[in-house]
Image (cartoon, coloured by chain):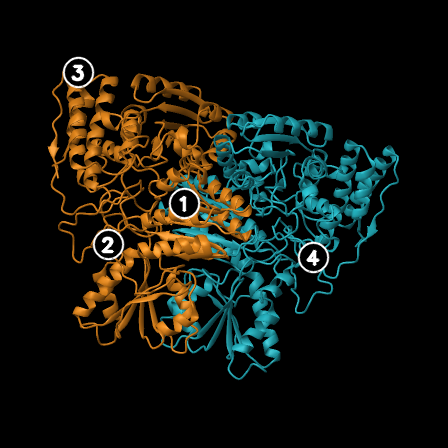
Chain colours: A orange, B cyan
Amino acid sequence: MPRPALIPPGEFARVAASLEPDARLAMLADMCRFNALTAVKRAGSGHLGSTFSSLDVVVHLLWEELNVVAVGFDSPDRDVFFSSKGHDVPGLYAALNALGVIPTDRLLGMRRLGGLDGHPDVGVPGIEANSGSLGMGISKARGIAWAKRHLGRDGRVVVMTGDGELQEGQNWEALQAASHQRVGRLLVVVDRNELQSDRPTEEILALESLQAKLGSFGCRVVTCDGHDHAALRSAFRDLWEEDDGTPGVLIAQTVKGKGVSFMEHPTALRDGGGTYRWHAGAPDDETFERAAAELEEGIRAHAETAGIETVVTELVPPLEEAAGTSLQGEPESGAGAPKPRPRVTGEYVAAAYGEALLELAAREPRLVVLDADLASDCRVRAFELAEPDRFVENGIAEQDMVSMAAGMARHGLVPVVNSFASFLASRANEQVYNQASERTKVVYAMHYAGLVPAGPGKSHQSLRDASLMAAIPGVTVVHPCNAEETRAVVEWAVLEATESVAIRLAIGPSPRRIELPAGHGLAPGVGSTLREGDDAMLVSYGPVMLHEALTAAELLAERRIETAVVAMPWLDRVDPGWLADTFGGVREVLVVEDHAPVGALGDTLRRGLAGLPEPPALDVAGVEGWPACGTPAEALRHHGLDGASLADRVALALPGRAGA
Amino acid sequence: MPRPALIPPGEFARVAASLEPDARLAMLADMCRFNALTAVKRAGSGHLGSTFSSLDVVVHLLWEELNVVAVGFDSPDRDVFFSSKGHDVPGLYAALNALGVIPTDRLLGMRRLGGLDGHPDVGVPGIEANSGSLGMGISKARGIAWAKRHLGRDGRVVVMTGDGELQEGQNWEALQAASHQRVGRLLVVVDRNELQSDRPTEEILALESLQAKLGSFGCRVVTCDGHDHAALRSAFRDLWEEDDGTPGVLIAQTVKGKGVSFMEHPTALRDGGGTYRWHAGAPDDETFERAAAELEEGIRAHAETAGIETVVTELVPPLEEAAGTSLQGEPESGAGAPKPRPRVTGEYVAAAYGEALLELAAREPRLVVLDADLASDCRVRAFELAEPDRFVENGIAEQDMVSMAAGMARHGLVPVVNSFASFLASRANEQVYNQASERTKVVYAMHYAGLVPAGPGKSHQSLRDASLMAAIPGVTVVHPCNAEETRAVVEWAVLEATESVAIRLAIGPSPRRIELPAGHGLAPGVGSTLREGDDAMLVSYGPVMLHEALTAAELLAERRIETAVVAMPWLDRVDPGWLADTFGGVREVLVVEDHAPVGALGDTLRRGLAGLPEPPALDVAGVEGWPACGTPAEALRHHGLDGASLADRVALALPGRAGA
């Protein structure tokens, strides 16, 4: 791995003090790009494309337009700026580090426990709002502006949104209210970089008449080049001067990947054969070095033009632990990680899911697949390419997607709906309830269910989805543990199930192959025993937590505690016969949830076990409180869900065996 | 009570066959109004205002524009029509009855068990989609049109929306996708009656540029008088002829309450001093008779003009049982209801909530109240009038409301957010999660929580909200049982709680006064014993289910089974000391949920009781499956949650006491 470098805050101060406004801002933005690149590389993941497209606006706001640096982030009279999408936060972190708000060691600990969250969190200095879940920012900004006015405080509110993000309907709710309520001092900047997750906005869901749309919702709209600081200055001035209470909107025309030639749109899109590679994920070593060199060269050119010395960079200390599985699923290198550290296989249950859909396309002509701009992450791109007439792209609009699927299901189709679990189960919850109430069948593929990868943070980690779906009548929640079980679950859901099915899927690589017993077939409500043991029993599901449970059992065996491990993929139903066979005579059970400790398997088993003549003592280990951001190992350990912690918990629960 | 009458289907057929198109349609619409009025009067509730505004369009579609009557509701090639808002379903029921699709006895059983649901349900003949939850219809209609195209089926899709309903962001998600995907054969009719729940749309949240908005979202828009059948005919023809795949939208300018002079906008709004009384609820006897007489006179005039005999009406059989508590909370008369039937008091916990807010306004200057067009139902109208600067009306946009509150909370205010539990906990779930993740405090007032009133049906009954909120870290879910406890909870939530609080509130009158022990103070996680008893224990919360639990205990006492009754308002946390004191030594506990049996108090107590040395046997009675539509007594009995059923369940669980 190359030794990345950072530009220290002092250099930012020197540049800011020595140049004319436009040259200063352009140079500072490239310096922030350089540091954001390093932070993302070290983190192993992050959104470089929109970090780079947004950085001129961010720098313009912080160094020139807003009062916040002058009055301080604690001042009630400060101007407030935040990004609604939040993916672009590495750029904001870099800017806040340059301004001395965020210490350098935290910047270097991005997506690590105790470092900086993968998406904005107000626990980080200078971060004004939690985001990462899309479409909420304009509403929040209006609330802030309303509070300022009500409390007689100074300060304006600027919120940045993505352009793809505007597909979320909440934006239009917020704009119509902003226009009607005339709160004032509210400005929206649209980072109009024309690309969303991996394809052009105009392909996914056209925004072509964006100016007209915004205008018809009562906004004052100005469009300008989002990398031209003179144009930005003039646009901001116009929008503030004409503030009549209605929201001002600046459509900042930007270039996704700006500053690194091979990451820039449209070059990068062409090079990627129609998909954009730099939306999320860290570059590999060679690409990182090319990108860093380009940015450094650009910064040198700025300095040369301005006639100042170029900035110095400082090598950053080597990583103590690899940053873990990213959304793209790069296996973590694990060097120096605490033991027992996760093993990593080449198995992705989500890939098995995508293959199963393709295979089912031939067997079930009624099968159709819907997506909300996560086709690559949800592994349905192959289906889209093979079956374009049976694939529907709805853009970032989960509610619309679910209700569209409901209409399709009522009229003879079997829709499979894809998104991340955190968005699908939550934002579209009322729509799922409504669909299920029509007694039709829709299959919900809830990707990225569970604690890890833990780098993106709490907006993306999904630890509540089982509880959100399980109380809906007629929805089965199931979480398969390996590729074969995933295929079997998808096949059962599409071909056999009579009601809706929510399938929780891990997004990263399986830390180990979970081997189900030979001949084990899929039967609703029935689990299987992976390992026998008379002293205690661990019950879990999914590749991540079953790996930890098995690791715990292995560690306990070294302490002569024989622990059974049971895989139970059905989170909201349990077969009474299997329950009696499996748990009869067992004394101690620890359920290991890849979920909050409420609303998932533990509660389901408690309900079932209450019917046994001598129910075992049942303990539940789950993600308590807010999920930690960090590497998988860090997050698992933090929540006491790594194998070693689980082993200790089991041992402690056994009478007289605590010291074993 | 007056003896309402219906016009039998034969008379509709005679009129349809004998008149010219325009005269026929206008007369049929008034005849439907007459029958819908009778159905609503018998039901004790229903939405007359939008039923009347939409009926000309509905009649025009069913009798002339669409093929569905000709090809049948089972034909895959049928045209599909449904209402997205669904409030207007009494008019559609009347039309479907007139066409012979719905039998008359079901029409007369509207909002009764086994009759017709208060909001559309596909289990009813001729109903194409479940609605009542707003804003989903355009998405669903697009899914239906997509399925028709994919499967090579004939038929067009027409969905009606309200105008206030367009405040929900999902509509704009759906329209942008419809425009982009060009599915075709999709038409939206906006019932532009200019009033929402009880005030003008332009006051709540202006739609003034509706045509421009729709146009900018890629729709082909035509506006016409929604009561002029020649204009409607021409508008439909234009929209279908110009179908280029983009959605057609007909803005039908209608009059809310059309057909009954004193229900018509704007007269009715003026008479109501700025609020419209006929959005929901049944008219009293005198008003009903005036309205029926006016409609009958209008129908007679139609016949006279056309030169045909006027239609005959038939008196309907008297009600066997009163239709129960409506949303407006009229106490049910209960004549002939099964025993033990609910008692009804003058106590409304929601009213106590509204009073508490008003009182707190003086004590907590940071308190602000947000509403999503349910200010009257949520009892915050008085607050709005008294504290207009501290009240924010966001229109029908729950997500926007919650995120706006999040922004306010971050900047020094204590927002109290109001909506129905079914909408707030579900549609805005991701926004609540995001808000809570900022570690601020927002108070969520979740009105209409629980099973009753059961007339509006499953879109409105809220039996999942505790499970939806309880898995969010830092949110307390509490359900008070009487006016004093409600005041105490609101005061605690606003003044003392350090994290967010979700308050479940019954919307109807308390069936009895729940008397808490003298000197009982509010303490988080602590319940109170209402009645002692050594044989068994019932645990519940809220005025509705505690009444049933007390009734059960009274019935059991007659059978010499002494049953304790415990009120436990805290649904997601329990104080260990109180738990041990209350449940130690108890053998049989039945938790009575005003909720699904998962995700609420039963699960919380199971988790807590597992720590006791000898935990009691715990059984949970809750609303299994889809909540029944009917009177309170019908719904409670259907789910086994009435006092008599609960008493039987307790008795059966006691060893050797089943026959007691």
Q: SS at mark 1?
A: strand
Q: Chain of mark 1?
A: A
- Does residue A421 show up? no
Viewer-closest of B36 and A234: B36
Give the distance between the C-alpha atoms of the residues marked 4 and 3, in whole angstroms.
82 Å
Q: Which residue is mark 4?
A: B323
Mark 1 near mark 4, Cβ–Cβ under 8 Å? no
The mark lying in front, picked from 2 and 3, is 2
**Dot 1 and dot 2 within a common chain:** yes
Rendered view: A409 above or below A499: above
Q: Residues within 10 Å of mark 2 (few under 14, many from 20)?
A: many
Per the rendering, the mark at residue A306 is 3
Q: Position of residue B537 (x, y in %)?
A: 50, 74
Amino acid at the residue labelled 2:
Pro
Q: Position of residue B563 (x, y in %)?
A: 54, 76
Q: Residue at x 27, y 59 (%)?
A: A514
Question: In screen coordinates, is B36 left or right of A154?
Answer: right
**Dot 4 and dot 3 within a common chain:** no
The mark lying in front, picked from 2 and 4, is 2
Q: Quadrant of residue B633?
A: bottom right
Q: SS at mark 2?
A: loop
Q: Chain of mark 4?
A: B
Per the rendering, the mark at residue A418 is 1
Q: Residues within 10 Å of mark 1 (few under 14, many from 20)?
A: many
Q: Quadrant of residue B558?
A: bottom right
Give the distance between the C-alpha atoms of the residues marked 1 and 2, in whole angstroms.
23 Å
Amino acid at the residue labelled 4:
Ala
Between discs 3 and 1, the one toward the N terminus: 3
